[in-house]
Amino acid sequence: MSTTTALSPEVLAKYQPVIGLEVHVQLLTETKAFCGCVNRYGGEPNTHVCPTCLGLPGALPVLNRRAVELAVLAAKAIHCEIRETSIFSRKNYFYPDSPKGYQISQFDKPIAEEGWIEVPGAAGATKRIGITRLHLEEDAGKSLHDGFADSVSRTYIDLNRCGTPLAEIVSEPDLRTPDEAFEYLTRLKEILLYCGVSDCNMEEGSLRCDANVSVMLKGSKQFGTKAEVKNVNSFRYIRAALEYEIERQIEVLEGGNRVVQESRLWNNAEGRTYSMRSKEQAHDYRYFPEPDLPPLVVGEAWKREILTALPELPEARRARMIAEYEINQQDAMTLTATRAFADSFEAAAKAAKSPRRVVSLITSELTGRLKAANLELEQSPVTLAGIVQAADLAESGELSSKMLKQLLDSCFAEGKDFAEIYEREKPQQISDAGAIEAMIDEVIAANPKQVAQYVGGKKTVAAFFVGNVMRLSKGQANPALLNELVTRKLDSLGGSH
Ligand code: ADP
Ligand code: ZN
Ligand code: MG
C-alpha cells in the first residue's frame, strides 16, 4: 500500500515535477480513416465494420481525405509546422481489439511537428508549452469486460471503433504542475472544438489522455524516470492522478529507491494509481513504412485551401472582444465558452441598440442566475434573442433595471424566455397624449439648459428629453407617441423664441 500523506511540505518542496501529455482525439469525419464505414459512436456491436477495418486478408486501406484536412486544421491551430510529405507506418503489436495485428500510424515522418499552446503562467503572464508532434493514426476496437451474463469468464470484442481516425498530439515535457496540465488540456480541447475537428467527448472516448510524469530534485538538469498514467477520463481526474503520482514518486525516492518506468492505471474510486505493465524494456513495435499506402502529400495549394476553414481561435477572439466590447478577461471567457455561443453572442450584440448593454446583461444578470439554477449557458431559459430584447428595452428607458431584474427572475422561475414573460408582465403603456405632454412639460421646465441647446440647433438633445420622460413614466409611455410629442413640443418652443 502506498501512503501519500507522510510527506512534509519541506520534502515535497525539494522536488520539481515534470509532465508531458499525449492526447488522442477522434476526428469528426463521416467515414473511418481507411475505409467507407461510418465513423459514429455506439451502434450494435460489430455493425460498422468491413473487410478493411476488420483486417481481412487482401483488403486495402484508402486514406480519408477529410481526416487529413482535419489534422492539418488542428495542427495549424496549435502552431505546428505541416510536413509536405508524411509517411504512414505500421506499429506492430498484438491485442485482441486490433484484428490486423498492427496499427496504421505515423512514426518518424508525422504530418505535423513543433507547435505550442499558451497556458496562463505566473502573475498574469502566459507560458508556452511545446508540442512535439501531431500525427494521424487509426483507433482500435473495444474489449468489453463486463455487462454480459458470462462476463466472469469471457471478454467480448466490439470492432465498431476500429479504424476511426485519430490525431495524436504529443506535448514536450514542459509542464511543471498538475494545474498547468489541466490548463493545457482545457486550452487544447477548446481549440479543437473551435476548429470543429473533434467533439472531444471524453465520456465517449473521443478525447483520451495519457499523462507522463516524473520528479527530479529542484535545480537538477536531468529529468527523473517517468511513469505514464492511463485510463483517466476527465481533466479533473488527470490532475488528481498527477498529484497522487508526484507524491508517490517522491516517496519512492525519499525511501532510497528508484522510480520504475511503467504504465500505471488510475483508480478513481480509490484515488490512486496502480502499476499496469513495466516499460523497462524499450517497446519493440517494429515500426516499418506501411506498404499499402503511398506517402501523404499535402502540397501548398491544398494546404492553403484547407486553412481557409481555420476560424478565429479562442485566445485571439478573446483579445479582440476585450477591446471591442470593453470587457474584462473573465467576461471574455464567459462569452467565448463555446464557438457557437460566441458566434450567436456577437450576432446578437451587433443587432442590439447597445452591444455593451447586452454584454453586461449576460455577465451580470444571466450568468449569476444560471449559476444559481445550476444551468449551463446552452440550457438558459432566456435565449440570446431574449437578452437582446431586454437590453433594447433597458436602453430605450422603457424598462427600469429593477423591473428588468424582476422579469428575468420570473423567466428563471418559470423556465420561460424573456419575450413571453415580458408580453405578460410588461408595464401598461400610457398612450394618452395629454398625460405624456404633462410629463414632457415637467421635464422641459426642469432642464432649461438642454432646451436652449435644442433651440440653438442641437437636435440630438431630443433623445435626452425622451429618456427622461420615459423614466418619469416608469417606462410606461408609448415610445412612438413620446418621440413624436417631444419633437413637436421642442420645435414649438423654438418657433416661439
Ligand atoms: P516514450 O518513448 O516512452 O513514448 P517519449 O519520449 O516519446 O516517451 O515521450 C512521451 C511523452 O512523455 C511526451 O509527452 C513527453 O513530453 C513525456 N516525457 C518524456 N520524458 C519525460 C519525463 N522524464 N518526465 C515526464 N514526461 C516525460
Ligand atoms: Zn470498415
Ligand atoms: Mg513515444
Image (cartoon, helix red, strand yellow):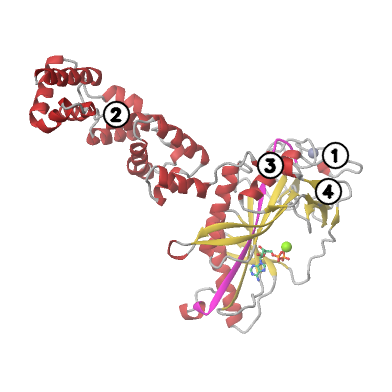
Q: Is mark 4 within 8 Å of ligand 3?
A: no
Q: CA distance from mark 1 to mark 2?
A: 62 Å
The amino acid on which the numbered mark 2 sits, given as a three-letter code, is Leu
Position of the C terminus by quadrant: top left
User: Can residue 300 be spotted in the picture?
Assistant: yes
Residue 489, horizontal then vertical, whole percent:
14, 19
Judging by the rendered image, the residue that carries numbered circle 4 is 295
Which residues are drawn in magenta? 13-32
Judging by the rendered image, the residue that carries numbered circle 2 is 393
Q: CA distance from mark 3 to mark 1?
A: 35 Å
The amino acid on which the numbered mark 1 sits, given as a three-letter code, is Pro
The amino acid on which the numbered mark 3 sits, given as a three-letter code, is Arg
Residue 457, horizontal then vertical, whole percent:
20, 26
Q: Earlier in the sequence, mark 2 or mark 4?
A: 4
Q: Is residue 248 magenta?
A: no
Q: Earlier in the sequence, mark 3 or mark 4?
A: 4
Q: CA distance from mark 2 to mark 3?
A: 46 Å
**443 relative to 325 in the view: left or right:** left
